[in-house]
Image (spheres, rainbow, N blue to C red):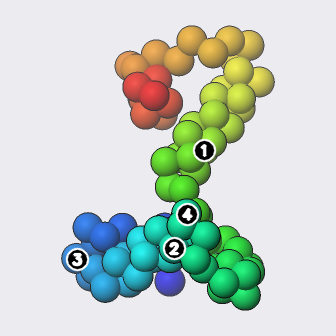
Amino acid sequence: QNGHCNVSTHDEHNKSLGQWVNKQRVSYKKNTLSSDRIQQLNSIGFIWDPLEHAWNEKFYQLCAFKAQNGHCNVSENDGPNKSLGLW
């Protein structure tokens, strides 16, 4: 439905699912999540560390920007790349 597995605990429409997702991440970090469950979640593209994922997404955007523009100096005033410039 949403095309991703990154459900926030702040999502009012999916609050209990967001809490469940957070619990899976905590269990994973504590090494208490079974390998079968890890494998199941991996198979659907589960994001274990949303901050790491967000950083990687911006890094890939920066790589694409550099490939297109020849530099990494992204302006905060560049409309389509504003969030990248802020990052």
In the rendering, at what x and y percent does residue 76 appear? 40, 20
Residue at image mark 1? 57
Question: Residue 67, relative to residue 9: is it above or below?
Answer: above
Q: 73 or 6: nearer the eye? A: 6
Secondary element at image label 4: helix
Determine the residue positioned at 50% across, 83% down.
1
Q: Earlier in the sequence, mark 4 or mark 3?
A: 3
> What amino acid is found at the position of numbered circle 3 in the picture?
Glu
Question: Residue 50, relative to residue 85: is it above or below?
Answer: below
Q: Earlier in the sequence, mark 2 or mark 1?
A: 2
Q: Are marks 4 and 1 in contact (CB under 8 Å)?
A: no
Determine the residue positioned at 54% across, 67% down.
30
Q: Residue furthest left?
A: 12
Determine the residue positioned at 73% across, 87% down.
36
> What amino acid is found at the position of numbered circle 2 in the picture?
Ser
Question: Residue 78, relative to residue 11: is it above or below?
Answer: above
Residue at image mark 2? 27
> What amino acid is found at the position of numbered circle 4 in the picture?
Lys
Q: 70 or 19: nearer the eye? A: 19
Residue at image mark 3? 12
> What amino acid is found at the position of numbered circle 1 in the picture?
Glu
